[in-house]
Amino acid sequence: MTIRSGRPGGIGRRGVALALGGALAAGALAACSSDPTQGASGGGSAGVLNMYLYQKPKTFSPLAPNNGPDLLVMSFIFDSLYGSDAAYALRPRMAAAPPQVAGDAKSVTFTLKPGLKWSDGQPLTAKDVVFTYNALANPATGSAQSGKFAAVVGAKDLADGKADSLKGVTAPDDTTVKITTSGPAAGLPGLIGNFPILPEHVLGKLPAKGLGDNAFFTKPTVASGAFTFVQYKTDQYVELAANPAYRQPVSVKKVFLKPVTSDVATAQLGTGEMDLAQVSPTDLAAVRKLKGVKVVTAKSPGFNRIAINQSQGRFKDVRVRQALLHAVDRKGLVDKVLGGAGTVVDSSFYGDLAPAGAGYAYDPAKAKSLLTAAGWDAAKPVTLSWVPGQRDRDTAATVIQSQLKAVGVNVELKQVQVDELLSSYEKKSFDLALFGGGNYATEPSTVAAIDACDQGYPTGGNVGHFCAPELDELLAKAATVSDPAERRSLFQQAAKVENAKAPYLWLYNPDTIWAYRTRLSGFEPAGIPTNEIGFWDFANWKLG
Amino acid sequence: MAAYVIRRVLANVLVFLLISVGIFVLVRLAPGDPVRMMVDPEQMRGGGAAFIEAKRHELGLDRPIFVQYGHWLSGALHGDLGYSYVGHRPVGAVLGERVGPTLQLMGAALAVALVVSVALGVAAAVRRNTAVDYGATVLGLAAVSVPPFFLGIVGIYVFSLQLGVLPSAGMTTPGGGGLVDQLRHLVLPGLILAFVTAGPFTRYVRGGLVDELGAEYVRTAEAKGASPARVVLRHALRNSLIPLITVVMYQIPQMLAGAVVIEQVFAWPGMGQLAVSSIGQHDYPVIVGFALYVAVLVLVCNLVADVLYAAVDPRVSLR
């Protein structure tokens, strides 16, 4: 480019302005007309429910790794044999009766309600259940759930490619599914009973390899749940319509699930653009002030905790771990950080399985003496890592830092990304890691995934590499017992052992808080924000 | 000029290839494994570990990086940028569906910003050191110093929650959305972005025009008896716009790359949200596709800026 001398000329002036303006106007108009959907307005319309989706969904596949927003959407469109009730006990949904576990706990029978139908009118039978379990148990489909079927006869042959189907899952008739296991597996119904059932008549003829990547899972064409899938407008909303073939009549005609920020969700509850939203404890005060909005809470099954890296010598001593529990005012955290909407936990086992009166009270003096007795080196720093972004955890981290410092644990805070945290688990390079979630309430034996000696990450979810053989023995024994009362007693014993050994610095079980506009009735709060299939009673939901 | 443009385009192809190698390698050098991130630790026992291994193989992440690049490049040369790890859809489609909403938001914001900034800049330059000038300066300063997220939240609070005249978020009312509905959704995010963009533009217009108004050709025009409006608008303003072309042409790629904060606050499905979520999820194909989209925009806008200089100022010739 060179500059040449001369007078400013007159050509091109209008051309430039017109070109620039025209391009912008064309762009704006093209974009304006890009949405072909036309129809009734969603906000506050009769029969149309707007619900908050706390993150964007990725796929609507039960084969994929669990992802909260995906599960929430799937809970509307796919039904399951069983679901968890408010107390996290299994409750029949498409099943006609509770699961029948044989005396030796080596076989389980599920019975389906008669006359179930897919949204396209095809019958939903035991064949669909067998197909679904085969897909889930087969890693070739892209399933991230195959491990849950490990106890089923033929699971290993299927996983190794030596068999085409799961030998231990059969359908003697249209409403009966029989599952045989290679060893006692009394916990199997709790592990697999709440999986969404997939349509064999749609997916059954496709090759198993890569089934999870099929377009069906981004746009499910048939549904068994209360709603059918209409569309996902990327990052805007998931649109669902009532399923006339659902086993109960549904009064809500349409549902829009909207992934917006929590601030916008709260504002929209006020404007009427949102009917139902899960709110964080920090927004609770603002939400309570909104007119025409009701707030309800439910106890969640998971809990926030700090994993302690017990592959390090200094954390192997149980007295150190107990000292950490005594050093933190967890009741104070619940009151201040959650506004009282939560419960302190002292065990990974849920509810009254946890030993009563065996809590670790806030007692800094006791914490100090336990640390002294264990020969704790106060000079050596301890890093507390967590993924920032959740307000209660962000606040809790700083409170915990100061309280641990007060007893001689020199905590340094470190904000990390998800993968950085996972990588530090794998390398065993973290000291303390704050996180939360999980559901150990529906099937207590799942505590093994985070506590058992052979479940160290990445084989399992025992990120702290805790090991207590007596706990493993009790959990293994519980798998062999079919009698619910006897299983319960074994879990209680296991919880007692776990509580004494303190594998985690347990913090609290935050309540799940739901806010809804009063035009919605019949809504029962779910403790699992993701719902994990099977809590909602859509037939009871009515819009005024 | 045609030879110049062809030369520049050919040079850009080379730059583009170099950028693609750089981005492809850098994205993979960043710590983090996209597949491991998909699985919660507590799911490892339930089949997560087997899933991670199988998925890594399926996505080719267990192959040497140059093999991965070769595979990607051969696809890219055939118009295939690969599949999103997260959405299981072609990257071209994933990017493509963001172009419309981004153009709508950014085009509207840029158009409003240009009109406002030229008008305000001219008024401030002509009425130098008066209340108009000071007012424009204060507004310009406010535009660059108040964070957009704050304006967004205040806007939602005032216009949606209190006055109830505008929707609080989204691009349309779910399921519905005629032109009027879309325009109503566009008002808040569009005006906030226009305000933020117009601030610096106004300063450039004012500064450029003040310089030009002191030039000798302006005195000549006045001496010839041209009206003040004609002197400012037909003579001085035109010459003062050259710096603005540079700024606007640098601004366009930035704007078309998405306004991360405003898109997030208003749940606008634009490029910015896509960029943030794909980086967060280590969705390599989408990150690379997005980076190349931005690279192309920058290269094209630079070229357009050079061509526009010549169109606006005949003293500039392109060889």
Image (cartoon, rainbow, N blue to C red):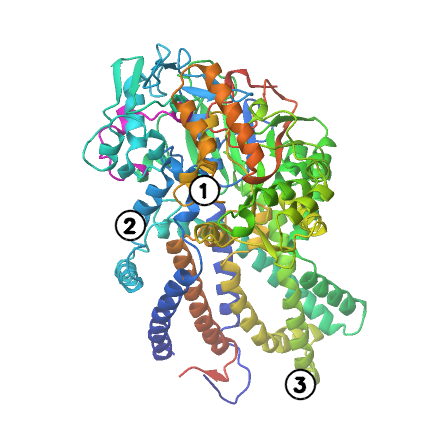
Q: Position of residue A234 (x, y in %)?
A: 46, 42
Is residue B39 inside the magenta stretch?
A: no
What is the tally of numbered marks visible in this picture?
A: 3
Q: Give the letter of the chain under mark 3.
A: B
Mark 1 vs 3, N-terminal side: 1
Q: Give the letter of the chain under mark 1.
A: B
Secondary structure beneath dot 1 equals helix
Residue B184 appearing in the image: no
Q: Which residue is mark 3?
A: B215
* Residue placed furthest toward the right: B131
Tell me the residue at 54%/22% (across/down): A47
Task: Give the number of the mark in front: 1 or 2.
Answer: 1
Q: Which residue is mark 1?
A: B41
Q: Which mark is residue A415?
A: none
Q: Amino acid at mark 1?
A: Pro
Front position in the image: B273 or B49: B49
Mark 3 vs 2, N-terminal side: 2
Give me the C-alpha separation between circle 1 and circle 3. 70 Å
Tell me the residue at 81%/67% (across/down): B131
Residue A104 appearing in the image: yes
Q: Amino acid at mark 2?
A: His
The answer to whether tags 3 and 2 share a subunit is yes
Q: Crowding at label 2, few (<14), some or many (≥20) Cα neighbours within 10 Å?
A: few
Residue stretch rendered in magenta on the structure? A190-212
- The reply to whether callout 1 and callout 2 are in contact (CB within 8 Å) is no
Q: Which residue is mark 2?
A: B57
Task: Give the number of the mark in front: 1 or 3.
Answer: 1
Q: Amino acid at mark 3?
A: Ala
Q: Position of residue B228 (x, y in %)?
A: 71, 75
Q: Position of residue A399 (x, y in %)?
A: 69, 47
* Residue placed furthest toward the left: A162
The answer to whether tags 1 and 2 share a subunit is yes
